[in-house]
Amino acid sequence: MAKLTIVGRDGTEKIVDGKVGWSVMENIRDSGFDELLALCGGCCSCATCHVHVDPDWTGQVGGPNPDEDDLLDTSDHKNETSRLSCQILFTEGLDGLRVQIAPED
């Protein structure tokens, strides 16, 4: 099973068995990280599932689409590895992916 490493806002790190075919956001919420609000439920209409992708993984994950990038612009914590976790489909190819939940705006 593909592994996903999730780092909470307090630095707590948890390695979970990621569910392939689910978004990274769904995997994070299913793993007990209540701090990831994901208010829109994955519709790419808010930025409450903002994560920072580990720099080693940005090539495999890719960058944000234009709508996602516009939403990320509303965050004071946007950086070059920012993504909305609802827009990252977790696949076997992302085995070992590491993301950190961005600070709350």
Image (spheres, rainbow, N blue to C red):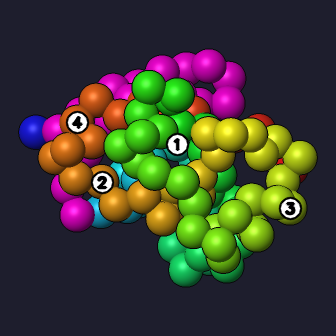
Q: Earlier in the sequence, mark 1 or mark 4?
A: 1
In the image, taking residue 14 as reference, residue 64 lies left or right, namely right
For label 2, the SS is: loop
- Three-letter amino acid code at the position of disc 2: Phe
Query: How far across and down, in percent of the image, does residue 102 sit?
Result: 69, 40
Question: Label 4: which residue?
Answer: 95
- For the residues labelled 1 and 2, the Cα–Cα distance comes to 17 Å
Quick one: label 4, few (<14), some, or many (20+) residues within 10 Å?
A: some
Q: Quadrant of residue 94?
A: top left
For label 4, the SS is: loop
Quick one: label 2, few (<14), some, or many (20+) residues within 10 Å?
A: many
- For the residues labelled 3 and 4, the Cα–Cα distance comes to 30 Å
Question: Label 3: which residue?
Answer: 74
Q: Nearer the viewer, mark 1 or mark 2?
A: 2
Q: In the picture shown, does residue 24 fall above or below 46?
A: above
For label 3, the SS is: loop
Query: How far across and down, in percent of the image, does residue 70 sit?
Result: 76, 69
Q: Which residues are magenta?
A: 2-21
Residue at the (16%, 46%) spot, across then down: 92
- For the residues labelled 4 and 2, the Cα–Cα distance comes to 8 Å
- Three-letter amino acid code at the position of disc 4: Asp
Q: In the picture shown, does residue 35 fall above or below 39?
A: above
Q: Earlier in the sequence, mark 3 or mark 1?
A: 1
- For the residues labelled 1 and 4, the Cα–Cα distance comes to 19 Å
Verify CB contact (< 8 Å) between mark 4 and mark 2. no
Residue at the (68%, 23%) spot, across then down: 10
Question: Label 1: which residue?
Answer: 33
Question: Label 2: which residue?
Answer: 90
